[in-house]
Image (cartoon, rainbow, N blue to C red):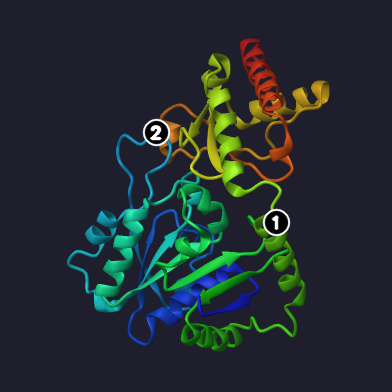
Amino acid sequence: KQDAVIIISGVMAQNIALRIHGGKHKYRFVCHESSHLLLHEQEAYQHLMHMDPIVISTRQSNDLFHSRPMEIKDVASALFEQDVNTVGTLLLELPHRELGGTCTPWEDILQMQDYCHSHGMKFHCDGARIFEATAGYDNKSLKELAEPFDSIYISFYKGLGGLSGAMLLGTSEFCNDVRVWLRRSGGNLYTLLPYAVSGWSGYRTNWVSAKIKFAEKQQKLARIIQLLSSNEKIHSCVSFHPPVPQVNMIHGFLCYSRQDCMNALDSVEKVHGIRVLSRIREVEESEPAYKNGFRCKFELSIGNANGAIDDDVYLKGWDLFTSALVARNSKGL
């Protein structure tokens, strides 16, 4: 891209992008129902930027865990008979974090680009994990992955491992407008040096000279999921979505309660010194997974530290964990 601006947070970055792309008259934007803007930002787009979303749902009645990623047919359907003159931006997340790290097909991305440009809209990428997303598109460089988008948000602290901070990238004109809105938003701190240095260090360490590339992290996760899924006892307790990870993260679902899982994790760690999960959340009753008998969920990612652990250790840890789960429940503990 021609230019870039460092911003203190992703929430601020993406809302600024929406506001700029909306101009004076386009007060709506399009995004998937799993977008971070809808789930985790307290409707900042509405309260601060006076924008309204057109929400795309890809849910189907037979979904087992998550809905599928957004595709061009969903965009065309959502905007059919809509006044596109009021729509400034189509926002696409790569990968879809809330959908287990699944990725919109490349051909759909290119068609979305064409659709946006032919309908006077801007194409924005929620690229908080765009470095991770490169593993989901074979033979695509980071530059190629970024090319279809008019603007991109990246995070310094996710795949790059920085302290905090974000960046918006786009044309020179876009970034000049970003600097104006950054001041209006109170984001022009006296110095952003700690974020810039940390982000640059993370970029060099985890991208340019990474000991384990993101594609290798994805491959390791795929091996681990295959090992776990092929073990009958483990597979009876946990299921993964997607079945084969597309990037270096995946979502898992357990049939047992969160408390049962935490107790089993604690007991295995105490006796064997192995803990396979650190954070588990309850499955909400409104989720497809709940209707299919799953009661808690987790996200599993491969980074530099756990990427160095032997695959056999993962298998051993999960075997111990699921054995503890089965034993505790058979005893009614």
Q: For the residues labelled 1 and 2, say whether their Cβ atoms are less than 8 Å apart.
A: no
Q: Which mark is residue 225?
A: none
Q: Which kind of residue does numbered mark 2 sit on?
A: Leu
| Quarter of the image where one finds residue 13 | bottom right
Residue at the left extreme? 81
Residue count near mark 1 (Cα–Cα under 10 Å), binned few <14, some 14–19, many ≥20: few
Identify the secondary structure beneath mark 1. Answer: loop
Residue that appears at 66% across and 16% down = 323
Residue 5, horizontal then vertical, whole percent: 59, 79
- Let me know if residue 48 appears in the view: no
Distance Cα–Cα, label 1 vs label 2:
39 Å
- Figure check: 94 above or below 301: below
Kind of residue at disc 1: Ser
Q: Which image quarter: residue 320? A: top right
Quadrant (top left, top right, bottom left, bottom right) of the C terminus? top right
Q: Where is residue 34 shown, x and y percent of the image? A: 44, 53
Q: Which residue is mark 1?
A: 209
Answer above or below: position of 253 versus 27: above
> Which numbered mark, 1 or 2, is in the foreground of this view?
1
Residue positioned most to the front: 139
Figure disc tally: 2
x, y percentage for residue 298? 58, 38
Q: Which residue is mark 2?
A: 64
Q: Nearer the viewer, residue 300 or 220?
A: 220
Helix, strand or loop at label 2? It is loop
